[in-house]
Amino acid sequence: MKMRKFERTTLIETWRDFVREDIEKGGRYYYVMIDLRDCDIVLMSYKSKAKYYVPIGAVKTKGEKTTVRNVNKLAGQIRCAVKTYNDKSIICYSRAVSEYGRKNVTDVAFVKEADNPHYKCAAPMKLYDRNVIEFYKGN
């Protein structure tokens, strides 16, 4: 298996299941990347030079034992890489429109909805990935 794709909002249990299965199969060295075409997480066994993959981290499952501690540690590394990337690149809809214009904010860049921190009764905030907007703006 050279590549695995996951949704950006994947829960930690899914990462743990993936790591556990991968260790049992012998393990690999994975690069954690973001696919700018559809905003998904991609785990590749090689570092792609394609312009639509952004490397955000790495994890090595090869040579590890299938213990709860190891599985949690490796799943945590993947989740931490994704969380760090999200903290740097996710912006709300109003900021995206003000920086890139309404026509450049596409549905592909949509990541998730979050509760509005300013107003309790307001609609949820729509969060977008800045790098995906820039990728589609350039094409």
Image (cartoon, rainbow, N blue to C red):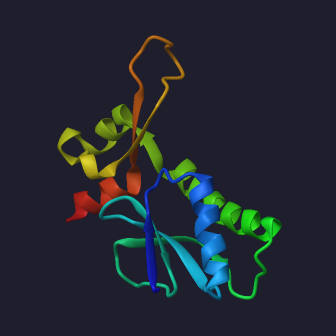
34 relative position to 93: left or right: right
Q: Quadrant of the C terminus?
A: bottom left
Q: Nearer the viewer, residue 66 or 9?
A: 66
* Residue shown at the point (25%, 46%) measured from the top left: 107
* Residue shown at the point (40%, 50%) measured from the top left: 129
Q: Nearer the viewer, residue 86 or 66?
A: 66
Relative height, residue 79 to residue 90 (above, below): below
* Residue shown at the point (39%, 57%) measured from the top left: 131
133 relative position to 33: left or right: left
| Image position, residue 2 (x, y; %) | 45, 86
Relative height, residue 111 to residue 76 (above, below): above
Looking at the rendered structure, the number of numbered marks drawn on it comes to 0
14 relative position to 80: left or right: left
> Is residue 83 shown to the viewer in this render?
yes
| Image position, residue 16 (x, y; %) | 65, 63
* Residue shown at the point (42%, 25%) measured from the top left: 124
Q: Nearer the viewer, residue 18 or 92?
A: 18
| Image position, residue 21 (x, y; %) | 61, 75
Question: Which image quadrant for residue 26?
Answer: bottom right
> Is residue 84 shown to the viewer in this render?
no
| Image position, residue 28 (x, y; %) | 61, 86
Residue found at the very far top of the displayed protein: 121
